[in-house]
Amino acid sequence: MSLPTPPRPDLPADAGEAGVVPRDDLQLPGPGRLILTAGWNLAEALGLPAAGYLLGAMLGGRAAGMAAAAGVIWLTVAVRKVATGTIPGLLIISALVLTLQAALVIATGSTLLFLLQFPLANLALCVLFARTAPTRQPLVAQLAAEVVGLRQPSSRYPGLDRFFQEVTWLWAGIFAASTAGLAVAMAIASAEVVELLTTAVTIGGIVVGAFLSALWFVRVLRRLGLHVRFTQV
């Protein structure tokens, strides 16, 4: 008599005894809607506060610029809540980080505290990602759903759940490394160099994180036999 075959951990919970998995791919909006969805979310979380900062800085300097950016983002949060009843995760992250930065800049005109906002902002992002990584709603999964409209399969795939948890840990690690790097730079470099490094580290960290996340995502989909398809609506 043969022993029963144990279930594979990467199969969805409703897979049959033979391990036959119903076709249930991930979904993305069509290219046009995808660009519109991502562009709208990025404009809300990054574009509007950046415009507020530039206008405020022109009228009253750095402190006024940071106050304007924080004011714009919280106004956007309020409008979103009233209009849709929900607040996207990316918008919440942007609001919290900008509030922290604005508080540091407004507290004093010190160049040191102005520069301190950058490693502290990265530290805050590290904590936000790390807090959700071990949960059933890791932040990367939430951002993928909100920013690009990614819809996961209706069947649950433990391997896919693990991917979103682990890639959330990856982003927490990237922001932790950025925090440490900028803190060291503040200790040994001039203010001008630190500002340049902040831009380089921020852009570089995002590019590296996005590349590693995408590569990892493709490998997970291949292992699970899943595909991503565009929807018509």
Image (cartoon, rainbow, N blue to C red):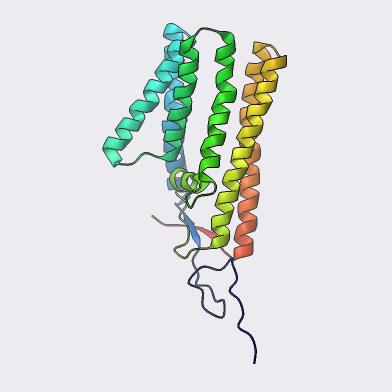
- Image point (52%, 67%), residue name: 12
- Image point (62%, 55%), residue name: 218
Give residue 206's quadrant in the image: top right
State the residue lying farthest toward the left. Answer: 82
The vertical placement of 43 against 30, above or below, is above
| Residue 222 drawn at (x, y percent) | 63, 62
Res 109 visible: yes
Image quadrant containing the C terminus: bottom left
| Residue 78 drawn at (x, y percent) | 31, 31
Report the front residue among 107 and 18: 107
The vertical placement of 156 against 60, above or below, is below
- Image point (47%, 61%), residue name: 153
Give residue 127's quadrant in the image: top right
Report the front residue among 146 and 231: 146
Res 210 visible: no
State the residue lying farthest toward the right. Answer: 188
Count of all numbered marks drawn on residues in the image: 0
- Image point (35%, 29%), residue name: 76
Left or right: 61 with respect to 163? left
Left or right: 84 with respect to 194? left
| Residue 180 drawn at (x, y percent) | 66, 27
Image quadrant containing the N terminus: bottom right
| Residue 65 drawn at (x, y percent) | 45, 14
The vertical placement of 71 against 32, above or below, is above
Left or right: 207 with respect to 54? right
